[in-house]
Image (spheres, grey):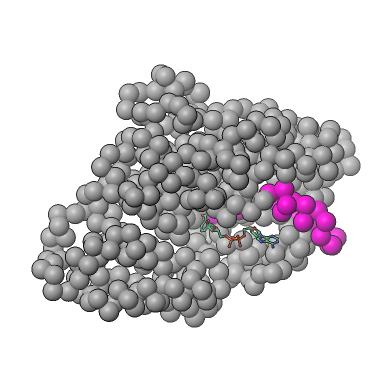
Amino acid sequence: RLADLVERGVPLADWPRGWFSVAQPVRLAGPLLSGRPRRGEALRRAMRQGRDAALHEIRLAGLRGCGGAGFSTGLKWRLAKEAVGAARYVTCNADEGEPGTFKDRLLLARRPDLVFEGMSVAGYVIGAKRGLLYLRGEYAYLMPHLRATLRRRHAEGLLGNRVLGTDFSFDIDIQLGAGAYVCGEETALLESLEGRRGIPRLRPPYPVSAGYLGGPTVNNNVETLAWAAHILARGAAGFRARGTAQSPGGKLLSIAGDVAAPGVYEFDFGITVREVLMACGAADTQAVQVGGPSGVLISAADFDRRIAFEDLSTGGAFTVFDASRDLVDIARQFTHFFAFESCGLCTPCRVGTQLLARAADQLADGRAGGADLRRIEETGRLMRQTSHCGLGQTAANPLLDLLSRFRPLCESRLRGDGFAPDAVDGRRPC
Ligand code: NAI
């Protein structure tokens, strides 16, 4: 398996034939996956430097949030550090619910120390005493492994009272989610952490000023925290030297779908979609979903675009569909996913996702007319503008992208076009 090759540090040249076709400048197994800062290295270095210098290092590196939005991590930490409030917190968003994303799962399985170390460093910088890792319900099987890692860190003085003999005390708890996609939205996650139903809060205030239990809170994705620890252990320069000016460093991608070698890959930001496709052995690619269903579905016309916050930003999902796939059916499935996962708080999302799911069924079954396509676009735009949180704002993306980038495909499925629901052009559903 790819992960085993990465884990064992097998040089690229020794990988089985067909697992990748481009060695340079593509980086398949970079420092986050195969580098091994020693346990405690980042924290020790941060504490030697002091809070301000450690924060400066993160800002110098230009690290941006790996959940997908790309907010400056250094700015987030500074805002939480300077916010007024007695108790501060660090929360780690390990509710990796976006379909097609599994890189955080690999990090938690293979690099848990790096993730916990990132939480400790963030806690040290902002002056928090408590960290909480919110673990996706479906990842419950990782719990014993993560708890054992925490116990080891306690035993080595990296967690608990007087960390490494200093006046800094910090502890980490793990809380299990219950499988709701919306709890990946940071304020719904905070509600859930506090023991309530996961419904997104109004922002502002942002968590940096009023987060967990109302205290200033740094909430970061698993990968962001792992990178933060890596930067503190190895310095900002190496990170800054990679990627693009606006998106420095590396990014883990969860590559799945119609590729020869699916898995978690580490690339420098700025790599093109085409290069990624070559690296993972994709052929006859019809479309790629970058960032999962809440992200963007692109066609071959966009394969020279770059994975970077200034171009195609992604939390990590990179799902490949070859020419045999029925994209209309795929968009239909994702639209139903959002309808199922809507928390129901706001009308645009609660009603809009149901309307879109019905319209997607009609389109996929050959029962839609031209006016239905226009209605999908109107509903989608309305949801994007008026929904309360990211779920409703992005739920129409699979259908809207299908309509804008694969219009002829949609039109060929309209009522009266000779479409036979059983045949579907010989295309396979997802
Ligand atoms: P956002 O851009 O509103 O916020 C991103 C982060 O920056 C948050 O932590 C927020 O608290 C912070 N922030 C933003 N403005 C701030 C300000 N003025 N002051 C202080 N802090 C501020 O993005 P949001 O709504 O939190 O997340 C949407 C993103 O999540 C999308 O871009 C999408 O790519 C990604 N996403 C990721 C998923 C995953 O599984 N990783 C699933 C679905 C969406």
- From the viewer's perspective, is residue 336 above or below residue 226? below
Q: Split into 4 quadrants, where in the image is the C terminus?
A: bottom left
Chain part drawn in magenta: 73-95
What's the residue at 72%, 48% (across, down)? 74
Asked if residue 37 lies in the magenta stretch, the reply is: no
Q: Position of residue 367 (x, y in %)?
A: 20, 75
336 lies left or right of 83: left
Q: Position of residue 259 (x, y in %)?
A: 32, 39
421 lies left or right of 341: left
What's the residue at 43%, 46% (across, down)? 305
What's the residue at 20%, 71% (across, down)? 414
Q: Say whether residue 256 is visible.
A: yes
What's the residue at 33%, 59% (across, down)? 405
Q: Position of residue 173 (x, y in %)?
A: 69, 50
Q: Determine the quadrant in which ligand 1 lies.
A: bottom right
As rendered, which of 177 and 275 lies closer to the eye? Answer: 275
